[in-house]
Amino acid sequence: MAGILLIIFLVWSMVVLDCNVVVVSGFVNQRRLNFNFNDRHHIKPLISITKSSLLLGKANKVHIRKHNKPSHTKRTRKNDISVSKPQKVSDNAHLMSIKVKEAKLVEKLLFDAVDKMTRSRQSGINIPPSKLFPSVRQCNAALATFGDSNDFRRALKLFTQMKKSASLVSRMSTSTYGKQSTTESSDDTTTANHPTIHSIDLVLDPPKPNLVTYSTLMSRAVSLGKPRVALRLWNLMRNQPNFYTNVLSRKERDVDISGDTKTELTAMELLQKENDIIVPDSIFCNTLMNAYAKLGKHEEARSILNAMLGLKGVSCHEGIPITPPTIYTYNTLADACKTAGELGAALEVLELMSAHADISPDARTYTILISTVARKKMNDKEARDIRSGGLYDPDMAFALLNRMINEDIVPNGVTYCALIDVCARCSRCDLALNGLRLMLKQKSASSLENNVRNVPMYHQQTLFNEVGAWTACINACGKTGRVDTAIRLFRTMQQVNVKPNAVTCGCLSDCLLKATPIRLTETLEVLQYMKKEELPPSPVMYTSLMGIALSLAEKENKNVIRKDGLQVQIIDNLDTSAPSDIEEDSKTSDAIVLYTELMRCLVLDGNNDEDVLFQVFLVFQEMRSVGAKPDLACYNSLLKACILSGDTDKTKDVIRRMAADDIEPNSNTLRSTLKAARKSKRSDIADAIWNYAVRYKKKKDAASPFKPRISDVELLLRVYLSELRSTTSHEERCLINKKIMNLYEGIVNRSEDRGLHHLSVSDIEDNQDFMLAVLRAAVSNELHAPTKEEKIHAKELACDIAGMEMFQYRFPQHVDRASKKALQLAQDWMWAY
């Protein structure tokens, strides 16, 4: 009996399991009807069971196999070539964006709290002490974030609100604020009105500015080139009632604090026991000294150090307590002397540091001292310090370098850059080259100490900021007229694994353009290097190149005179030696070549800023204003700039200008613009460029000179796919999918309007990736097209593609999952016919 019951139970289990598998299969087929095969963000792991597997009774095995191999999906996605990888965002930029959001939230909370306190004070309504304010620590962090993001004005507004909140609370009487019990205040918090707040803790006390607040604002002001604002903040802090000197002057104390250092230290210890007292520390003193250093006021910076050391009988800065200086303090004082050009005062820093056994000079100290040599230009009536050296005498810089090496301090690239820059100021190019040789000798010596073998000497190690030393040497050679030496240095540094930066290229191009005659060939070499390394020209270099190109164009066009911004056309009937138009067109002028290379340097692939587009159009307009006729290379750069900025109207305007100037587009015009359109994800601009290229006809020729190739069609398809992945709108996706389908049908139908009649249909249909993209577009349109006719047409096209011979075999591993599902659904439609 038990055996019979066991057999019945097993049979019942098999029947139920088969039914569940069939139900699952029906559910999967239902889910396919709403699946978008081009949207990789909505792919879910579904179970696919074919009709043949159900008929053969292998549904259970398929079900188990799909769940026992989860790594198959990972391998498929890893090897998928049709899915675009997400763009990598810099970690620092991402972290800064998070900090800015938190800072804006702190700002909003503080503004709301101050507004509430202001309204309650004006209306006289009693309010209980509630947690309205962010803490002073969070406000200080917000100030630092706004300063680091170059929004210093916003930081000052937040600082004003901090002072206002503290002032409002202090002026409010106890009848309006503070009479309620702490039980009521604990229940009344403003975090309920901000459900998204997780890291902002509101407190009862207003964020009264403290020492960190002022130090943060002053350091950001100095870093942004606003040292005078930092000094105003210092004067504002000194006038606060809770500043330590004001507190000492108000209170009656048992000890006499006048003139005795030991008694003053005792008073400072008593002040530290109280709250909300602002006492400057060494970090704040360094920040204040740095503000004076940026202005070149070395005497005020020295007075701060005297006050920190507690020296008597010398000038001491008012309001600075006795606090131990650091190495940064002495380096900042030396930097102040460097800005003022006072080498004698800078050398005294070494003597002051030698008086403290705990502090010794480092590489930055000697670098600042070396950079101070021969910096100040003296008048004939001014007495010269003996230690500053002569006007053309960089011996003191080399003496400091030797002293640095004797003290076992290793010079870096910044040190040699300062040394070579001193030689450049002294117009001693030979000594500048000697400084570069010393740096290379140090590199070779360090490589031998590390036992590095079988590697070229100058390829082994790179010093910190070594490119700065090479740049300074190129600049020194250029200023002294040794242009050929500067060019050789530029080429040599690339061979020794030191890449020139934008400053290097700017210095070299400046000396090349100032040479007599102008070294245009080498200048174009520098611009081509900048284009290759994606180095945008600086504003100074941009302006210099524009001026040189303008002068070249005016010299080439002798009939144009520009004076005071006006352009005058001169007609000379007696001049019979003017060249013909054919001779002018046979060779591109130097001005147009320079204009073109400048436009190419401005238009970088990753730069889509509107300011770049403005600069490129400015170059183009300047070229036309001086009478220079832009060539095809200029228009290609202009088109690329318009496409990267995403400006459709300007792109079409450039196309109209090309047609008006009878500029014949070539294959480079189409390919470069299509690549730019793919990066900007603009298929409409790609279509406009394609139609202009294939429909362009010369005035004397009825045929179009441009014949697209299969690679061009694939590039146009990639433009469609890039925009397709970037949008989530069904209407836009249906429109792009329709473009993909029309592209394939145009090749099949030999469309002459789009220039597709030259292409081979068999070559296109043998391209698996191309046909899979068309298949996904057709299946997606069959599911989401707005009209019934479009759905029927898309379904027929999908069935035709699914019936091709190459889709009758097993796919390789690189085919993505969306394409496999689209093909499976298209084959189901084909079987259903």
Image (cartoon, grey):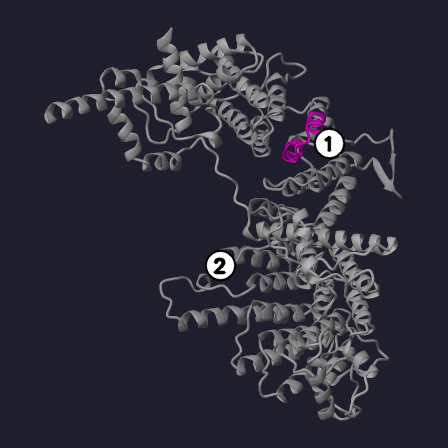
Indicate the quadrant containing the C terminus: top left, top right, bottom left or bottom right: top left
Check disc 1 and give the amino acid type: Lys
* Mark closest to the chain's N terminus, 2 or 1: 2
Tell me if 354 is positioned left or right of 23 in this view: right
Residue 788: percent from the left, percent from the top? 53, 9
Tell me if 55 is positioned left or right of 352 in this view: left
Circle 2 SS class: loop
Q: Is residue 649 magenta?
A: yes
Alpha carbon distance from label 2 to label 1: 41 Å
Residue 792: percent from the left, percent from the top? 49, 9
The foreground one among 467 and 770 is 770
Which residue occupies the extreme top position in the image?
Answer: 833
The answer to which quarter of the image holds residue 167 is bottom right
Q: Which residue is mark 2?
A: 496
The foreground one among 428 and 398 is 398
Total marks shown come to 2
Q: Which numbered disc covers residue 480?
A: none
Indicate the quadrant containing the N terminus: top left, top right, bottom left or bottom right: top left
Residue 29: percent from the left, percent from the top? 39, 19
Q: Which numbered disc covers residue 629?
A: 1
Residue 176: percent from the left, percent from the top? 82, 60
Q: State if disc 1 and disc 2 touch (CB < 8 Å).
A: no
Q: Using the rendered image of the protein, determine whether residue 668 is visible from the camera's viewpoint.
A: yes
In the picture shown, does residue 815 fall above or below 71? above
The foreground one among 433 and 603 is 603
The foreground one among 383 and 100 is 100
Q: Nearer the viewer, mark 2 or mark 1?
A: 2
Give the residue displayed 72% in from the left and 62% down from the top: 181
